[in-house]
Image (cartoon, coloured by chain):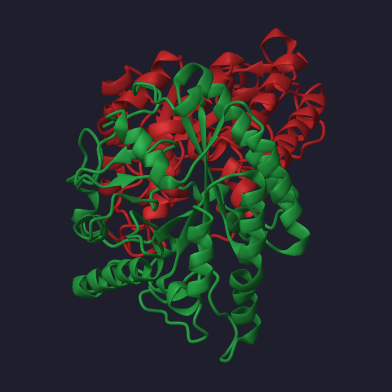
Chain colours: A red, B green
Amino acid sequence: MQEGAADPGLYDFSPYRDRPKIVWPGGKSVAVWVAPNLEYYEIDPPANPSRKSWTRPHPDVVGYSHRDHSNRVSHWRMAEAMSRHGFPGSVSLSVALCQHHPEVVEDGAKRGWEFFSHGIYNTRYTYGMDEAQERAIIEDSIATVQAATGQRIRGWLAPALTHTPRTLDLIAEYGLDYTCDLYHDDQVQPVKVKSGRLASIPYSLEVNDHYGFFVYNMSPRDYADTLIRQFDRLAAEGERSGTVMCIPLHAYLIGQPHRIGAFERVLEHIAADGRAWIARAGEIVDAWQAQAGRAQTGDAA
Amino acid sequence: MSLDPAYLTYSKRRLGYDHELYPWSSIFDRPPVSWPGGKTVAVWICVSLEWFPITPTDTPFRAPGHMVTPYPDYRHYTSRDYGTRVGVYRLLDAFAKAGVTASIATNAAIAERYPELIADIIAAGHEIIAHSTDMNGTIATGLPIEDERALISSSLDTLERVSGIRPRGWLSIARSQSWNTPDLLREAGLDYTCDWVNDELPYRFANGLINLPLNHELSDRQIITVQQQSADSYAEQMRDAFDWLAGEGRTHGGRLLPLHITPYIMALPYRIDAFETLLQDLTGRPEAWVASGGTIVDQWSGQLRA
């Protein structure tokens, strides 16, 4: 990025009209990926000067135990619903979960889920890190996920969405293929980085279950309706050029008993529609790269 | 710029939690729990019965629902008091009509001020859970341990003196605890707390205290007051939750559905009908076992769950 510039210079303007046509495998118009956040929030983390980890003095019983619901109860409820309808996960992982609750990580791996890094803990923020410190969390992420799952991470969602000006350059330098931190498009887009190559895959704040329930205060059925409308629109527009829909989830929210039934009906709807390529993040980036990536990045290699 | 190197050390990065309070387990891996009569969903009605002094304190923090405007905040003081004068009686009538027993999480100040209400609650067969002293009795790290110990014992002693029964359960205001709270609750002889929201079955702390999870996401305060949804939407969400848990109950054993309600929120004339209808509906479900917190804890611990 161009640090200090009014436009960070991450990408060129590329109007939605008249783009090269992307067609997803099987002639599908919309690539749908589900992104469960498998997270660990520490009960008593050290303070980052730029951001408090909990709103209350530690222990924040509600904050901590609400998130712990994922690892005791709702992860399995959410994961079973996804497996029943043929949706693999592409996991944004607090990699320390590999140490704390390896059972949860193993469950995802057994289901064929892809893992990318969401930092060490969601209570350790990147703000203020120097380059060596930031390299350390990237290297830790690569090694930890490799050891736990055998997978080489291909993507990054910054822990608690905390970045430095060098984050995207660094992850590209380490050979990661995609970032989930930019929300500027409904198609995969190239990101300008110092070295290597990086794709921005559409993630979503707007249809993230956290936004649905805690920013927009939706009821579970309203949130389900939102996802269905998001899907129907992107599937229709994707006939012109393939679109991407991400469903970012937190088990402690979507896996609550009053929400999971409505969500399962969304999965049924998308699976039955016929226009969706239900895939993992890395597969979507690969399919995009094969069709449009070289032309759009100008990469001569 | 760089962060303190300590920010990149992780001394609690290990198998299990980063604390010693309770061990991890997945609800789907535990031996199934059975509720009486072969029922699969324990429906636990918990009512928060609160007295808000018109002189709020912010130490350690101001309770949710407390005074908002400059002194004297008649608006909020009287709106909250409506719940203890009118609303709670609507709820007691609704419970009687549905034939159910509830847990009433009660500030000690309610017992001091309205002993006749406590007598009505006890006469109807409901359980009283200790809910601090009054709504200034908040707990957080930084509260001196002697002050916290006194707060807990004062609440229990007052509720016992007025009701004739020493409470077995504890609900902190806003579920906020200090690092000392679990041990102080145990020391005070309590069997269970309802503060931690991380499960849909009871579980036991390392010190022997049981946590009976009172899911804050399913409370009327969260759904109606915080998320600004209707009483009808609240009731629909409870039905959806019940149906899902009953489905799990068929294959995984007993589950717990807490209905956490507040007299000044749910028992308003335009909302109570939705709640009465919900109660009638749930009590008619073949999977439902409606019981107080203490009864649920006894059933669970009688099956020697860890």
Instruction: Please state the horizontal and vertical placement of residue A262, each as a whole percent of the image.
Output: 67, 31
Indicate left or right for A73 with B270 as reference. Answer: left
Q: Residue furthest top?
A: A26
Asked whether residue B101 is in view, the answer is yes
Q: Residue furthest bottom?
A: B71
Q: Residue at x 76, y 53 (%)?
A: B273
Instruction: Please state the horizontal and vertical placement of residue B51, each as a whole percent of the image.
Output: 50, 75
Count of numbered marks: 0
- Image-quadrant location for residue A103: top left
- Image-quadrant location for residue A257: top right
Q: Looking at the picture, does residue A95 appear above or below residue B86?
A: above
Q: Looking at the picture, does residue A226 appear above or below residue A76?
A: below
Q: Looking at the picture, does residue B67 appear above or below residue B205?
A: below
Q: Residue furthest front?
A: B123
**Closest to the observer, A88 or A174:** A88
- Image-quadrant location for residue B1: bottom left
**Closest to the observer, A51 or B13:** B13
Instruction: Please state the horizontal and vertical placement of residue B232, each as a whole percent of the image.
Output: 75, 48
Q: Residue at x 49, y 52 (%)?
A: B125
Asked whether residue A280 is in view, the answer is no
